Structures are given as C-alpha cells and as structure tokens.
Image: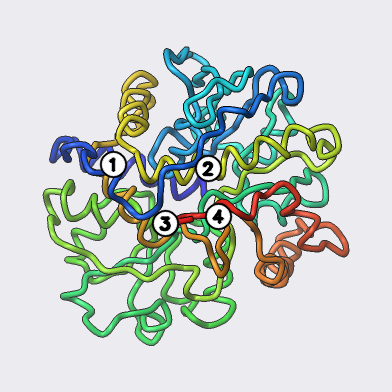
Amino acid sequence: MRSIRLGIVVLAVLALAAAGCGGDGDEGGSQGAGTTAPSDASVSLAGTCPDTVVVQTDWDPESEYGVYYHMLGPNPDVDTERKRVTAPLVAGGKDTGVKLEVRLGGPSIGFEPVSSQMYKDPSITLGQVSTDEAIRFSAKQATQAVVAPMETSPFMIMWDPQAYPQFNTIADIGKTDTKVLFFEGDTYMEFLTGTNMLKKSQVDGSYDGKPGNFVAADGKVAQAGFATSEPYIYEHEVRQWNKPVKYALVSEAGYPFYPQALSIRTADKQKLAPCLEKLVPIVQRAQVDFLANPAKTNELVLNLVKQYNTGWVYSAGLADYAITKMRENFVTNGPDQTLGNFDNARVQRMIEIVTPIFTAQRQPPKEGLTPEDIATNEFIDTSIGVGT
C-alpha cells in the first residue's frame, strides 16, 4: 500500500501543478447509496476506552479514510509538526467522552508499515493494516483486524481503452506482451506473475508514480494504481492526457484481501475488548453516515491536507470522485447485510496465496496461522450495513 501511495503523491503533485485543483465540492452527498446512520447518542466510551483513542493511518488525509475524520468532533486540534489531528470522538454527532487522534502515515512515519509502527509506539490504539500485511508480520508483530470499513480494495491496473479495446481483465493484459508498470515490492504482483496471469517478462517495477511514461508511451503500457484516484486524475488533472482510462481490479483477479482494516496489536485484545464492543459499531455507523453525508468531512480532509503541507495534493473533484466510487464498488456489505465484517474463507485464501510468497522472501508468517488469528467479527454489530 505505502509504495503505491508514494507514487500517487508524486503523480498528484505533478498533475495538479499542470492542471490546477478541480472539482466543485460535494453538494449532493446525502443522495448517495446508503442511509444516515442511527444515533449513537447513548454511547459513552469514557472509562471504557483509552482517554484518547489513537488511530494510525497509512497515508495523508483522503476520502478513502474519511470514516475516521468523520468521527472527529468540532474544533479539532491540528498538530502540523507531528502530523496528527485530535478532537472529541463523536458518535451520531454526540461526544462519547473520549478523544480521537488520527495520525498520518506514509512519509510522515518514514514509510514504515503500520504494523511495525504500532509495535514501535504503544500509544497507538488501532492502525490500518491490510490482510496481506497482517499475514506478513504475523510471526513477530501480530495484529488482529476488528472491522473493515472498505469491503473491496481499489487496487487496479489501468490502460488506454483506445490503444487496447480488447482488454477487460488483467488476464487479458497477460495474453499480450504489453508492459505493466508497477511499484517494486507490491505483493499482489507476485501473485499475478506466480499464477501466470501476467508474464514476469512484461512487468516493470520501476514505476514511480509519475505520469510521464504512460503519457510518452501514448497509452501503450498498462499501469498500477487506485480505482478511486488515478482514473479521475488522468482524465481531469493530467493535462497531457486528459481522457478516460479503463481498469480492472486486482481483487477480481483472485487476490481478495481486506484493505486497511482497522486492527489492534493481538496481545491487546483482552484489555481493549470492553472498548471495542462499543467502538467498532461506532466505526461501522460512521462509515455508513460518512458516505451518505460526506460534504463536511471532505471539507475537513481538504483543509487538513493544506495545513499539513506534506506535498500531498488532494482536490475537491478527486474527493467527490472517490466518494462516488466507494459508494458504487468498494464500501459494500459483501455477501451479507453487514458492513465491516470478515469472511474467514476469504482470509484463509489470502493466507494460502501469500504464505509461500513471504516464505520465499525469508519472512515466513506465523506457523499454523488461521483466519481467526488476524481478523475477528467478535465486536461487529451485524445489524449495521449500507442501506440498512
């Protein structure tokens, strides 16, 4: 994740320098898929949760992480030096009696994996940890996911539909010799080449996020990225391209990880259990509410991006696009009526996929790792879902 995000920051900076910020804000957010969350007015976390619940993200503020910013109360305290924001933790607009601190990741923590950062800094309560990362660090820096605000990952590979009208899936790309630009070290690419969906000879790990190679090749290459960002950026903010791209999701190719699931250090579960019983449903409802009414939270996200001034550039138009894509494709209830829960068969499939990859990289996962070791539905409120 962090390597792709590094590329996007470079891409966004270059693109927006050429084209300027786009978009007019989200005035129609309440009309999106999903309903306003029920009130959490009776929920008090005081004396149950830490006085300050600290959430470590893996990148700068963006709409994909809006659920956490949505839970920040009024008049947040922004620490531009340490790159974190703190405010009362609110549920249904009501103060829960504790504070929420949302910290930046990526360049702000030296591109450290969130799992590692959580073990370096015990003040972190929860962090964003994707399934493959949890498996990778399960032996020595174990984490357990307690809720997945996003059901499906927006990881994708994109191409120019005019240059390659025959492409509809990643496997279609592999039937040709088309070069695929990606960030070296991304685990999903090991899966795609290991299953011969893509040829090792056609993948190029030198991609640094800049649009130059894609533009210079006149679209005759494919390129990794996020379905919630690059398609908008290339069509609207990269002046040299300024036309649509098409993409296929990595998840559709059989890599079904949960992206940036909110996770605890495994050893903290017993201590945090009383807190998580109340907090996890608040996160579930906040995600539903955010997607139904994103305008104010997106305004905060954009304001924080400006205040932090890390080099990350994020436009109102891109924020709106991300919301639309999240509603349509990525924040769903999965196969049931619940948002945020985990399918053990899906987690087991990820264990089977990445264990040989990490073992070959001399970082074997925990011996006998099970889905329950890295994800739990114990604190999920099954009545909360998008559209319920």
Counting residues from the start of the chain, the first of labels 3 and 1 encountered is: 1
Helix, strand or loop status at disc 4: loop
Q: Residue at x 67, y 33 (%)?
A: 117
Left or right, residue 106 beside residue 265:
left
Residue highlighted by disc 4: 339
Q: Residue at x 78, y 52 (%)?
A: 138
Left or right, residue 138 beside residue 81:
right
Counting residues from the start of the chain, the first of labels 1 and 2 encountered is: 1
Counting residues from the start of the chain, the first of labels 4 and 1 encountered is: 1
Left or right, residue 57 beside residue 381:
left
Q: Nearer the viewer, mark 4 or mark 3?
A: 4
Q: State the separation of the CA atoms marked 4 and 2.
A: 9 Å
The residue closer to the viewer here, 47 or 365, is 47
Helix, strand or loop status at disc 1: helix
Check disc 1 and give the amino acid type: Ala
Residue 12: which disc?
A: 1
Q: Nearer the viewer, mark 3 or mark 2?
A: 2
Using a 10 Å C-alpha cutoff, classify the residue at mark 3 as few (fewer than 14 neighbours), some (14 to 19) or many (20 or more). Answer: few
Q: Nearer the viewer, mark 4 or mark 1?
A: 4
The residue closer to the viewer here, 37 or 169, is 37
Q: Residue at x 35, y 22 (%)?
A: 309
Check disc 2 and give the amino acid type: Arg
Check disc 3 and give the amino acid type: Ser
Counting residues from the start of the chain, the first of labels 4 and 3 encountered is: 3
In this view, 57 is above or below 193: above
Residue highlighted by disc 2: 285
- Residue 257 picture quarter: bottom right
Left or right, residue 126 beside residue 236:
right
Residue 248: x and y in percent read: 37, 71
- Residue 329 picture quarter: bottom left
